[in-house]
Amino acid sequence: MRQNVGMARKFVRKHRRGVKSPATSAPRPATQTPPEPDKGYYPTDSEALRAADAALAERGRRLDGATEIDPLEAAEPTEDDGQEPDGGPGEGLEALEALEADDGPDPDATLPPEAPKPPPGSREFKYGTRLRVLRKIADGGMGSVFLGEQLGDAGFAKTVAIKIIRSDRLADPKALQMFVDEAKLVADLVHINIAQVYNLARYKDRYFVVMEFLHAKSLSQYLHLFRERKARPPADMSAFIVSRVCRGLDYAHGKRDRSGRPLGLVHRDVTPSNIMMDFRGAVKLTDFGIAKALTMNMPDETKVIMGKFPYMSPEQAAAKPTDARSDIFSLGLILYELLTGTRVYTPRTRDELLKLMNNYRIRDPRKIVDDLPDELVAITMKALEKDPAQRYKSAMAFGEALEQFMYGKGYGPTNEKLAAHLLELWPDVDRDKVE
Ligand SMILES: Nc1ncnc2c1ncn2[C@@H]1O[C@H](COP(=O)(O)OP(=O)(O)OP(=O)(O)O)[C@@H](O)[C@H]1O
Ligand SMILES: [Mg+2]
């Protein structure tokens, strides 16, 4: 590894001097006349670096007030921009600022356990990744979520969400280990219905996840809006949203590692707050795998899993092993809530939940909303069977049943229709603008 880094440094130095291998060398003009775009002129390294510096300085001016996280060089702490996050209480920019105020980088700032040996013939080189924190988006159960940018060279900036995990959630070494293990498992989950994780990193003593930024509303915000209006979401939209989560779940449940071995991933925290809908109509499941680590083996377990009980499967509640069908049950609970505006159960403690499970009965949704389509009710109830063997065998089968319901008779909901529906509910949102 050390050797690889050494080789990479030589490689970079050689290229900085402008000596290029035939495969990578770009055509250059014979003389250093002023650049003419589109005529085969490519900037030299120093020109490119100057342009990058200028672009970054310009960006910095425009984004005045942002905070940068630079693992190699701590950035100046800056003030919060005063915008109110829409979440509840939690750790905010203060956490970041406190972190910036510490002295220098932590010498043991590597993730446990050590990374596996790189494959022979591969090369590694190190570069400083800079993150710019723009503003807090929300406080959540796991920590605080910030809007940020991942900065590259030449003014490259990718909009990202940065989720800084509350330090108390990872205080127990077992939880920390699980968090890291799970994050590594989900690193390669790339699917239109799953919010992508770009990086898991540690800066000083804080862990954070860099992920796809979603210009979106969560399903809990969506349900909340309908509750406020004393209305219910349209049944076909509910079926559509849930069918898209099924696609994401099915992909993750069947995910294999590079050698083809099934990973056996189960989300375990399929809740309305972890389902987001962007203003282009895409439905994304978030926090894959993170939940397991953060909700188990914690010092104060009851407090930590509080708030999730309404979306737990019977086997989860009984602390039995879970598989893909547990996620199907949780999603069934969400579909029921979307269709009826009522939660199947609202236990506040694990004991209450276990009691409900012993006397397991679910009210027919048609007793709450009388005009619900029978087919959709049957699909919901099958996902909510107490015995996992009686449920859908896979998230795909659940999703297909919903698609049969939606499209069996012709043209049904699409991403575009969901986008139009969301924009009707939030008319002030400009879907092309983040801030
Ligand atoms: N990738 C993202 N892009 C944009 N906003 C996000 C992103 N991830 C989370 N958020 C916002 O931040 C809020 C808090 O997220 P977080 O996952 O920390 O907590 P939660 O989902 O509310 O609760 P929990 O995950 O503990 O059940 C979300 O409700 C959502 O509004
Ligand atoms: Mg979440």
Image (cartoon, rainbow, N blue to C red):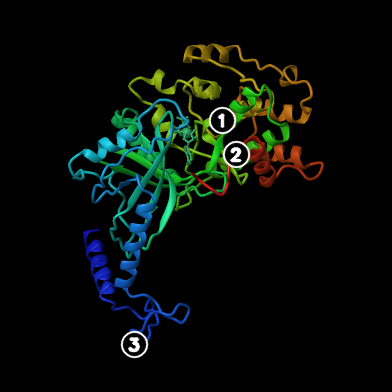
Q: Is residue 34 left or right of residue 73?
A: right
Residue 330: quarter of image = top right
In the image, what residue occupies the spot 65% across and 23% down?
A: 341
On screen, residue 275 above or below 118: above
Residue labelled 3 has its Cβ within 8 Å of some atom of ligand 1: no
Q: How many callouts does the rendering have?
A: 3
Q: Residues within 10 Å of mark 1 (few under 14, many from 20)?
A: some
In the image, the residue with mark 1 has its CB under 8 Å from the nearest atom of ligand 1: yes
Q: Position of residue 91 (x, y in %)?
A: 35, 30
The answer to whether the residue labelled 3 contacts the one labelled 1, judged by CB atoms less than 8 Å apart, is no
Outermost residue, right direction? 409
The mark found on residue 184 in the picture is none
The answer for how far apart the CA atoms under marks 3 and 1 are is 61 Å
Residue at mark 1: 221
Q: Nearer the viewer, mark 2 or mark 1?
A: 2
Q: Amino acid at mark 2?
A: Asp
Q: Nearer the viewer, residue 350 or 158?
A: 158
Separation of residues labelled 2 and 1 (CA atoms): 15 Å
Q: CA distance from mark 3 to mark 2?
A: 54 Å
Tag 2: Cα neighbours inside 10 Å, few (<14), some, or many (≥20)?
Answer: few
Return the residue at label 2: 428
Which residue: 42% across, 35% down? 83
Which is nearer the eye, 111 or 370? 370
* Residue type at tag 3: Thr
Per the image, the residue denoted by label 3 is 31
Residue 252 shows up from this direction: yes
At 55% from the left and 41% from the top, the residue drawn is: 284
Check disc 3: other Cα within 10 Å, few if <14, some if 14-19, many if 20+.
Answer: few
Which element is circle 1 on?
Answer: helix
Amino acid beneath label 1: Gln
